[in-house]
Amino acid sequence: MSQTFRHPEILEIVRREGKVTVEGLARHFDVTLQTIRRDLTDLADAGRLERVHGGAVLPSGTTNIGYEERRSLKSDEKRAMARACAAEIPNGISLFLNIGTSTEAVAQELMHHENLMVVTNNMNVANILAGNRDCEIIVTGGQLRRADGGLVGNLAAETIRQFKFDLAVIGCSALDREGDLLDFDIQEVSVSQAILRQSRKTYLVADQSKLSRSAPARIASLADIDTFFTDRPLPADLATSCDAWRTKLVVADR
């Protein structure tokens, strides 16, 4: 396979998995390690990837990848995490679901829950749960972000401050090895922080490709999360930290 055909497939693999290794790609394409190293160097020089020891990851930066593209990434893993999360959500509670494709997946799994009051700043979540007649839906105000249907800004945060939720389910754009939850949009970060303050219990739903990404704005720490739903076991150091923080880990079974 020529370089012209390998590059798009390499990018597709790294978008899907979050990280690629030289050895893994060499086996996948049945080419030499040197050939893959040249491919990754070319893609890094073009700003499409960021080289790391032994492979490459999605480039760090201040801009998130497109929402429709994010919807298609890790779709099986998101469904598994959403099922595991929804199984821990009881009927008859007040619940907040924030912006993100993972929280939308959770909303899909709540279609048969009963007597829920769901507050959201995600128009997509509201439209999904409109199909559950036993779910009261409250949408925050705020500035509409057309790219993903999110409502952000001071009005959204002010609406959230009027509530005390039994449970909030949130996502994040990136997660670093120190356990910090990160995002790209400062306005969204302020809303997420308001959600955490106004919730008695908080669940995070995030696949581990988030550990291969970086974003500039800090939301909170995993120490502030009650349960973290993910798709693979965490690196040992981060798992140890979660244990010290009493943050429960749930690895979803696909």
Image: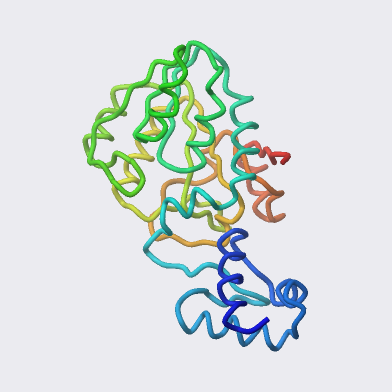
Which residue is located at x 42 percent, y 17 percent?
A: 117
Q: How many marks?
A: 0
Q: Quadrant of residue 136?
A: top left
Colour scheme in use = rainbow
Nearer to us in this view, 31 or 103: 31
Eyeballing the image, is 118 above or below 123? above
Depth check: give the residue in front, 76 or 238.
76
The quadrant in which residue 158 appears is top left
Residue 154, position as x, y percentages in the image: 22, 39
| Residue 152, picture quadrant | top left
Q: Position of residue 140 (x, y in %)?
A: 29, 29
Q: Give 176 or 41, whichever is nearer the viewer.
A: 41
Residue 109 coordinates in the image, percent (x, y): 57, 28
- Does residue 19 appear to the left or right of 192 in the view shown? right
Q: Quadrant of the C terminus?
A: top right
State the quadrant of the N terminus: bottom right
Using the image, determine if residue 148 lies above or below residue 128: below
Identified at 68% across, 37% down, the residue is 250
* In the image: residue 181, left or right of residue 31: left
Residue at 59 percent of width and 65 percent of height: 14
Residue 145, given in percent of the width and then of the height, sits at 28, 45
Q: Is residue 50 above or below residue 175?
A: below
Relative vertical location of residue 143 with respect to residue 72 in this rendering, above or below:
above
Give the left or right position of residue 99, taking residue 111 as reference. Answer: left
Horizontal placement of 23 versus 72: left or right? Answer: right
